[in-house]
Amino acid sequence: MRPPKVNSFLGCMTVHTGAAIIGWLCLINSIFVLISLTTYAAEFSQISEAQQAAMIERLGNYPQYDTTDKEDVKTVVYYVQVVFWFIFAIGICKFLIDLFLVIGVHKKNHYLMLPWLIMQGLGCVLPFTALILWCAMILMFLVQILSSGEENHQFIKAIAITIGLIINSALASYCFLIVHTCYTNFKNQLKQSAMVYVKM
């Protein structure tokens, strides 16, 4: 089943322009994320072992003892660094994929747009899955409130989170459809050009 095609972006711009805007916004976001991660890495590397131990205790990742074992602190810091560099590697990959999207839209090269479509496709599936699971939890929570007959302000917060998930899923899906339509148009144009070249 192929995704539906979109005729315009926001009803007033072409799909090509929309794909370019989406690509640049994603690329700028990736740059800000990488700058934030780099700044965090630089600051964390300058923190002393005593400060690192205090941070771990405040975060609740280290048991509260009168004395802290330096080896245990180093082990926790090591695992934190491993997780951080894994996230940093994902950030670099996302930056490259967003860069390929911008170049692909500019050069009308649909091959360069494919990695972003794959990444965004997964990004659409995960929020929808989270939304379905969250709605199931909300329904169980609502049944519990109705059965108890008590007012609960947590339910209002849960509804707000649900609305946020719906908006996030809708935006991610719309961006995917815009870029996929642009990808399909470029692909069809390449096929038509190849057919004209063969006939000549």
Image: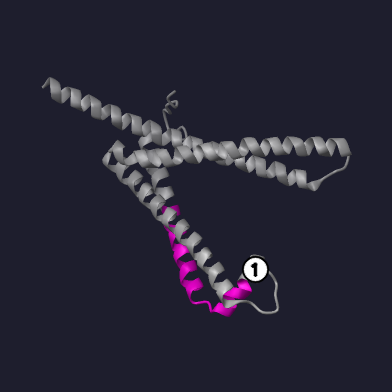
Q: Residue furthest top?
A: 199
Q: Position of residue 56 (x, y in %)?
A: 62, 69
- Extent of the magenta region: 28-55
Comparing 192 with 67, the one in front is 67
Res. 13 in view = no
Magenta region, mostly helix, strand or loop? helix
Q: Residue furthest left?
A: 200
Image position of 186 with respect to 48: above or below: above
Q: Position of residue 99 (x, y in %)?
A: 35, 49
Res. 114 in view = yes
Identity, as a three-letter code, of the amino acid under mark 1? Tyr
Judged from the image, the secondary structure of the residue bearing numbered disc 1 is: loop
Q: Say left or right for 44 vs 166.
A: left
**Label 1, on which residue?**
62
Image point (39%, 31%), residue name: 181
Image position of 80 with respect to 12: above or below: below
Comparing 81 with 170, the one in front is 81
Image quarter for residue 49?
A: bottom right
Q: How is the image coloured?
A: one colour
Q: Position of residue 10 (x, y in %)?
A: 47, 35
Comparing 57 with 192, the one in front is 57
